[in-house]
Image (tube, helix red, strand yellow):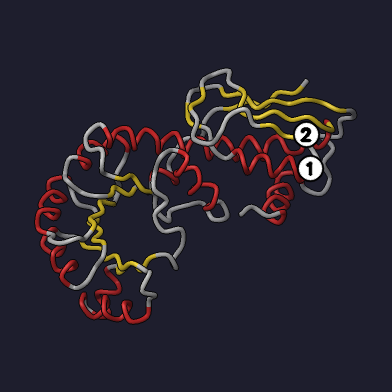
Amino acid sequence: MLTDTDVERWLREDVGHHDVTNHVPGETEGRLVAKESGVAAGLEAATAVFDYLGVAVETPVDAGERIDPGDVVLRTDGPARETLRGERVAVNLVGHASGVATTTRRAVEAARAVDGDVRIACTRKTTPGLRGIEKRAVAAGGGDTHRLDLSHTVMVKDNHVAEMGLEGAVDHFRERASFTTKIEVEVETPETAPEAAAAGADIVLLDNMSPAEIERAVDLVDGPVLTEASGGITVADVPDYAGTGVDVISMGALTHSAPTLDLSFRTG
């Protein structure tokens, strides 16, 4: 949930303590216009900014909707000074979120062209302070948000295994986690995947493996265990990984490398 504190932090960073630039009198109407095709997202954050400033907002499109050059994604009506103060923050939020949603949609479509069942997911490689916006943008693009924070899933990584051993680590966390919490185990070789499943993993994360290695690992895992491919995967790589039989492809690139969608805010 976005709060006034979030909005105040964003505005304080951009407006500062002595804003002369935006001391513009009167009332004005504004519109946020797409300059390239993509998927809309981040509109709720932009709306929160203008609401906080006392500027009326209308969003002609919904999150997840495709937009083309010239499409108006947000309209404002209110004091010129407050409209201009919120402009850059709103444009940055919508541009970044829409870039994440657009990149996610491309990955989802690339995966579905090969296998309609494989899921595209993001990771915890998000921008501090913007995770909620970025995760919602992934959802708008048709992706899975994965775990929202550390409390949602236990991830047994290489350092845990080094300290407690594979079975010991899984048992350790199983005793401490809620019965509703899934255990995911990260492995680095195909041969370790069935060992993780046998140790009690609900999900086996196949880390930094080639598509051929992923396919072998999936074949080795028995039972109702989900398999997840991760590690440096780009949109261009998705078709190769989608054809391996893996259940989930998780990509940090959806959030940390998505280009900003080009938008322009115009008044008058």
User: Which residue in the structure is indicated by mark 2?
Assistant: 83
| Up-down relation of residue 262 to residue 120 (above or below) | above
Quadrant of the image containing the N terminus: bottom right
Do callouts 2 and 1 mark residues in contact (Cβ within 8 Å)? Answer: yes
User: Which residue in the structure is indicated by mark 1?
Assistant: 53
Q: CA distance from mark 2 to mark 1?
A: 8 Å
Q: Is residue 165 left or right of residue 105?
A: left
Q: Is residue 109 left or right of residue 19?
A: left
Quadrant of the image containing the C terminus: top right
| Residue 31 image position (x, y, % from top left) | 69, 25
Q: Quick one: 62 or 33, which is closer to the camera?
A: 62
Task: Name which residue type carries label 1.
Answer: Leu
Task: Name which residue type carries label 2.
Answer: Thr
Q: For the residue labelled by badge 2, is the local secondary structure a helix, a strand or a loop?
A: helix
Q: Which mark is residue 220?
A: none
| Up-down relation of residue 152 to residue 134 (above or below) | below
Quarter of the figure with residue 163: bottom left
Residue at (56, 35) in percent of width and height: 95
| Up-down relation of residue 221 to residue 254 (above or below) | below
| Residue 212 image position (x, y, % from top left) | 12, 46
